[in-house]
Image (cartoon, rainbow, N blue to C red):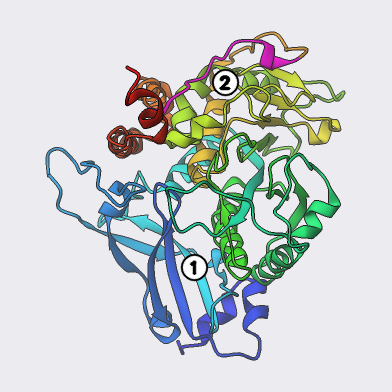
């Protein structure tokens, strides 16, 4: 095969991007536990000749700070085995912000016996989706991505500030759905659209959210693995678009005090593979047992999964009353104060929205954990609590409030571990506890201000 013959099999957007041009480089990437793209950039001619490449499995033991969790097999020690990484060419897409003609390709991780690496995030999601398929179900998701555009911040000791808009004024808060506010970020949004088009991604809409400089991008519903790939790619393209305009894009759950946090709301439905119909709706359009069991699964197992959907100490600052984030797992119809919302829809479009997941979570793991909870509910035929009516913020919280507590609940969730994979659960817990212990060594400004001379 010549250096260019393999390009004939690329997805249409990638081929359109390269039409009449010579491909220079291919970025071979994989998501680690935090969702950071790891891998290698290779010349296009080399990529054409290689069937796989190698990275050490220790990339999945690395914390967000660059430290290492002692997550290697306890019987073999920390020997950093090489994984075999094979390209999924269906994920090949442009990297349109680069100075030359570059493609990105997501790879899948296997061991030397050709078994999927169980703690690779994409493999975790694929495992959960397969469990649905084994029951004759096709899960469908639609993620919503919230994020902030903020002024450049090079000093971690300084507060995060909103970016300057086109008017020369800082972005204003409490302007949800304002088109004028969206226009303030016009140049950045234009680049986001251009990059997304070059990569073949369809944006369902962009809106201004309630925070200063906070935006939301909605994606079309579809296959969970494909949508997780897109969120993984989107995080990178949004950051690159922001950098072109002298600002940062952040997916941190709560970057600015007294402003709403950023969520990754996940809409769920399940199709019957045999009929192609929505399993949440019956022949006459009514709600089915599967619909209620899915909600029951979320209510029962989400406390155990919060450590995956809210993976950092900062994540728990989102769960504050009256700050556009849930504090409990009540469910309600068209009620944005509940953790589980049933949006208005036709019977064909009936779906369940999980409002707990933060935008700081790994998209593969966040979607996998949410699907796992719904799957367990359907398999165990769990009935949900009574529908909540009214303001759910008036009720009590029933989710973990700090990462340490969330990890304790996660560690005891054997049923959830079986769905996500016991080896993933083991490695994930070790890595997150390493991060949490490192955080506990940091003394905050609040402690110095209020405790230094007063206690």
Q: Is residue 119 left or right of residue 234?
A: left
Determine crowd level at label 1: few under 14, some 14-19, many 20+ residues with C-alpha closer than 10 A.
Answer: many
Residue 297 image label: 2
**Residue appearing at x 30%, y 52% in the figure:** 66
Expressed as whole percent of the image width and height from the top left, the position of residue 428 reads: 34, 38
Residue 192 place in picture, x, y as percent = 68, 64
Would residue 46 be seen by someone viewing this image from the given angle? yes
Vertically, is 68 above or below 420? below
Residue 59 vs residue 185: left or right? left
Looking at the figure, which quarter contains the N terminus?
Answer: bottom left
Position of 225 relative to 311 (above/below): below
Label 2 residue SS? helix
Could you say which quadrant of the image residue 435 lies in? Answer: top left
Q: Main secondary structure of the magenta part?
A: loop
Q: Which residues are magenta?
A: 391-403
Say the numbered circle drawn on residue 37: none
Q: Residue at x 39, y 79 (%)?
A: 42
Say if the magenta span includes residue 91. no
Q: Earlier in the sequence, mark 1 or mark 2?
A: 1
**Farthest-out residue, front:** 453
Pick the residue in front: 54 or 195.
195
Q: Specify whether 269 is left or right of 400.
A: right
User: Residue at position x 65%, y 45% from top?
Assistant: 146
Report which residue position mark 1 lands on: 105
Q: Is residue 57 above or below residue 247?
A: above
């Amino acid at each position: 095969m010549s250096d260019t013959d393999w390009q004939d099999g690329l997805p249409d957007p990638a081929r359109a991007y390269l039409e009449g041009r010579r491909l220079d480089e291919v970025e071979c990437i994989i998501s680690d536990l935090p969702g950071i793209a790891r891998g290698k950039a290779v010349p296009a001619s080399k990529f054409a000749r290689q069937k796989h490449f190698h990275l050490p499995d220790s990339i999945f033991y690395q914390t967000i700070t660059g430290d290492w969790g002692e997550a290697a097999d306890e019987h073999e020690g920390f020997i950093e085995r090489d994984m075999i990484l094979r390209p999924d060419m269906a994920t090949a897409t442009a990297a349109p912000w680069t100075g030359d003609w570059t493609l990105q390709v997501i790879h899948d991780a296997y061991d030397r016996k050709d078994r999927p690496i169980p703690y690779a995030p994409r493999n975790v999601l694929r495992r959960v989706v397969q469990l649905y398929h084994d029951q004759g179900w096709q899960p469908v998701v639609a993620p919503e991505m919230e994020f902030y555009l903020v002024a450049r911040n090079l000093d971690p000791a300084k507060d995060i500030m909103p970016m300057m808009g086109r008017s020369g004024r800082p972005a204003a808060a409490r302007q949800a759905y304002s088109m004028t506010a969206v226009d303030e970020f016009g140049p950045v949004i234009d680049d986001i659209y251009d990059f997304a088009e070059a990569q073949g991604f369809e944006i369902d809409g962009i809106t201004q959210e309630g925070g200063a400089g906070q935006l939301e991008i909605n994606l079309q519903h579809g296959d969970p693995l494909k949508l997780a790939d897109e969120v993984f790619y989107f995080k990178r393209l949004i950051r690159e678009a922001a950098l072109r305009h002298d600002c940062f894009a952040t997916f941190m759950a709560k970057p600015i005090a007294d402003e709403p946090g950023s969520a990754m709301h996940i809409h769920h439905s399940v199709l019957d593979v045999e009929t192609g119909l929505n399993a949440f709706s019956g022949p006459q359009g009514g709600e089915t047992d599967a619909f209620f069991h899915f909600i029951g699964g979320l209510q029962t197992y989400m406390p155990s999964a919060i450590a995956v959907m809210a993976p950092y100490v900062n994540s728990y600052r989102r769960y504050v009353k009256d700050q556009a984030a849930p504090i409990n797992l009540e469910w309600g119809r068209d009620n944005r104060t509940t953790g589980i919302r049933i949006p208005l829809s036709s019977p064909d479009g009936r779906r369940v929205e999980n409002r707990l997941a933060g935008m700081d979570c790994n998209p593969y793991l966040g979607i996998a954990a949410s699907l796992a909870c719904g799957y367990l509910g359907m398999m165990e035929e769990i009935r949900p609590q009574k529908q909540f009516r009214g303001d759910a913020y008036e009720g009590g919280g029933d989710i973990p409030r700090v990462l340490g507590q969330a990890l304790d609940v996660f560690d005891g969730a054997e049923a959830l571990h079986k769905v996500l994979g016991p080896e993933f659960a083991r490695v994930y817990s070790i890595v997150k506890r390493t991060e949490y212990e490192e955080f506990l060594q940091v003394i905050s400004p609040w402690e110095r201000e209020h405790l230094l001379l007063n206690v």
